Amino acid sequence: MQTQRLRIAIQKKGRLSKECQDLLRRCGVKFNLVGERLVVHSENMPIDLLLVRDDDIPGLIMDGVVDLGVIGENELEEVGLERAALNEPCNYELLRRLDFGGCRLSIAIDKDAKYNGPQDLQGKRIATTYPQLVKRYMDEQGVKFSHCLLNGSVEVAPRAGLADAICDLVSTGATLEANGLKEVEVILRSKAVLIQRTGEFSIDKQALIERLLTRMQGVLQAKE
Ligand code: PRT
Ligand code: ZN
């Protein structure tokens, strides 16, 4: 069901939400976030913001339920691979790479273990929230491994005896260090991106998207 107003999905609460809201505000979109609302109407533009879990954003775009979304490439690629494997719609258009949410998806092992390359992970169990991205990487390397799917506390899995290695997001490296782990392979470098659903847009929506993109270009350049 398409609406006249441009629908933009953003993370409700988390590492991308503040910078995402700041970016929209700098692009001139006025809105007031009150309470626990899922949909927030902009006060000065025909835009509705959808405040959701980041995990839901790729699917909302790929199913054509919302027009634009801001999401980390890690999440976008994982959901895309999962949907492709299930023969579900997985198309989207990348409008812009943004300047926040930077991190890397890395494999880490016990800090004292020897490591000479991906072949050392042969037959090991890897704990992760990103099974598709790990599988793609390990297939590329020709290394067989087993999964340990965890949606939280991934970094404690080796110490808890659940896995031999982990594959998780890293920014400063402090979490790995605190858990006695060392980063041995970077399998993806990620930033937040602005994406768009595929398909037709009304002339008005298209014009609004272009206006937003021009403003965004200005905002991002001014920060450089
Ligand atoms: O509730 P919701 O599902 O919306 O949020 P979430 O908990 O799934 O995601 P959130 O808010 O933690 O992260 C949203 C996005 O921010 C991620 O998908 C990444 O694109 C991006 N991002 C950038 C990060 C990090 N940096 C990051 N460091 N996401 C998570 N981390 C975690 C990491 O998982 C690990 O636990 O931070 C820890 C490592 O940080 P360092 O600094 O110790 O290395
Ligand atoms: Zn999430």
Image (cartoon, rainbow, N blue to C red):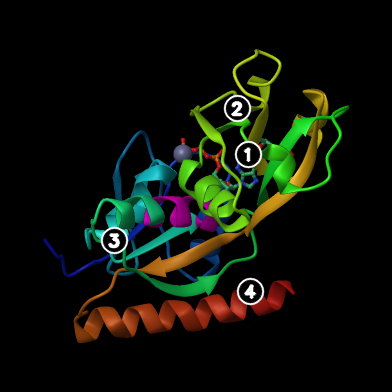
Q: Check mark 1 vs ligand 1: CB closer than 8 Å? yes or no.
A: yes
Name which residue lies at 58% across and 53% down: 137
Q: Over which residues does the magenta segment extend?
A: 72-80
Mark 1 and mark 3: span between their CA atoms?
24 Å
Of callouts 4 and 2, the N-terminal one: 2
Give residue 220's mark.
4
| Residue under numbered circle 2 | 154
Q: Nearer the viewer, mark 1 or mark 3?
A: 1
Q: Is residue 179 above or below residue 183?
A: above
Whole-percent x and y of residue 45? 32, 69
Q: Amino acid at mark 2?
A: Val
| Residue under numbered circle 3 | 62
Name which residue lies at 57% across and 80% down: 217
Give residue 115's mark.
none
Q: Amino acid at mark 4?
A: Leu
Q: Amino acid at mark 1?
A: Asp
Of callouts 3 and 4, the N-terminal one: 3
Q: Nearer the viewer, mark 3 or mark 4?
A: 3
Q: Is residue 86 above or below residue 175?
A: below
- Closer-to-camera residue (218/172): 172
Mark 4 and mark 1: span between their CA atoms?
28 Å
Q: Nearer the viewer, mark 4 or mark 1?
A: 1
At mark 2, the secondary structure is: helix
